[in-house]
Image: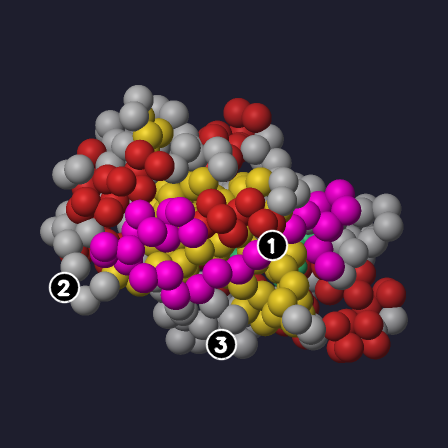
Amino acid sequence: MTPQSAILQPVPDHARHLFFGLKPAADPRAALQVLAAACDGASAVLGIGANVADTLGVKLADLRGFPDLPDARPAIPTTQHALWLWLRGDEPGDLLLQGHALEALAAPAFTRVQAIDSFRHRDSRDLTGYEDGTENPRDEAAVEAAIAHGRGAGIDGSSFAAVQQWLHDFPTFDSMPRAEQDNCFGRERDSNEELDDAPESAHVKRTAQEDFEPEAFVVRRSMPWVEGADAGLVFLAFGKSFDAFEAQLRRMTGHDDGISDALFSFTRPLSGGYYWCPPLGAAGIDLRVLGL
Ligand code: HEM
């Protein structure tokens, strides 16, 4: 069981997210096989949406679309696509060109519908200045949280990715006193220390991974994005299923106790999708459970 290795690596300097829709009446088999051979799981991670498995007539127990959360406050958008490619590297020009090559391979069955460039800011900080990823599980704990095991050949070694593009409202954030900004996250920005007296709405209280039943650990690989005057975070979390992310998102949106995450005072998601990242085999990505 070999996962796509990037899942367990720190975030790179640059990344590019590509999202694809399935062309009407297209048979995705040949394009998937070519993409699976072309993605090494290190510089290019392949994620597959539930509708692709549906099209192939395959039911994978844990693969589903991004949820509708009717009682979420605020509302959470769903923009589920058929495929997601996460390209990682040192330089955005190279990622663009690598993306073009992969888009050409996908083209017989898939159309690219969105592209987002992202980058590492300082020592993995969000553009608000807060360090992101501190409480990520590491080493064996990361494997335990993010990689499926004991579920059969072809699923073992795979991972389940939740991807959301968030848009920050910088004028609102910048107008907050520092104490209020710290309270939004529940951490002091410069020291990165957790606040003893953080409000219940603080982001790290909403998402404290050991406070869920069962515990909800994920491996986050989020990175900032900028496009023109707009900017924010591409949130990316890997789990052994989508359940831990979904439990966190529900608590952030008030599902458990009516309290919404204070992050929503200055940022909101524009998109959201779920993608299954198959394991690596001897000759590229292993799609045996899709019958390929
Ligand atoms: C713009 C959106 C977001 C920003 C800027 C953000 C930023 C942060 C920061 C700065 C931390 C504290 C340091 C750390 O442990 O990484 C954190 C923690 C965390 N965030 Fe987020 N986050 C965002 C969205 C989300 C979403 C959508 C989820 C899941 C649904 C999430 C899950 C978590 C988890 C699990 C932790 C660690 C909690 C713990 O166990 O202490 N975050 N986030």
Residue 88 is left or right of residue 51, and the answer is right
Looking at the figure, which quarter contains the C terminus? top left
In whole angstroms, how far apart are the C-alphas of marks 2 and 3? 32 Å
Q: Quick one: label 2, few (<14), some, or many (20+) residues within 10 Å?
A: few
Q: Are marks 1 and 2 in contact (CB under 8 Å)?
A: no
Question: What SS does tag 1 mark?
Answer: strand
Residue nearer the viewer, 265 or 8:
8
From this view, report whether residue 37 is shown above or below residue 261. above
Residue 92 is left or right of residue 25, and the answer is right
Question: What SS does tag 3 mark?
Answer: loop
Residue under the point 12% across and 51% down: 57
* 110 part of magenta stretch: yes
Image coordinates for residue 166, horizontal then vertical, percent: 58, 66
Question: What SS does tag 2 mark?
Answer: loop
Q: Which residue is mark 2?
A: 25
Q: Is residue 243 visible?
A: no
Front label number (2 vs 3) = 2
Q: Looking at the rendered structure, which numbered label has been put on residue 201?
A: none
Q: Which residue is mark 3?
A: 75
From this view, report whether residue 14 is shown above or below residue 152. below
Residue under the point 28% across and 32% down: 286
Front label number (1 vs 3) = 1
Amino acid type of the residue tagged 1 in the rendering: Ser
Q: Looking at the rendered structure, which numbered label has been put on residue 118?
A: 1
Q: Quick one: label 3, few (<14), some, or many (20+) residues within 10 Å?
A: few
Lower sequence index among marks 1 and 2: 2
Q: Is residue 282 visible?
A: yes
Boundaries of the magenta span: 100-127
Looking at the figure, which quarter contains the N terminus? top left
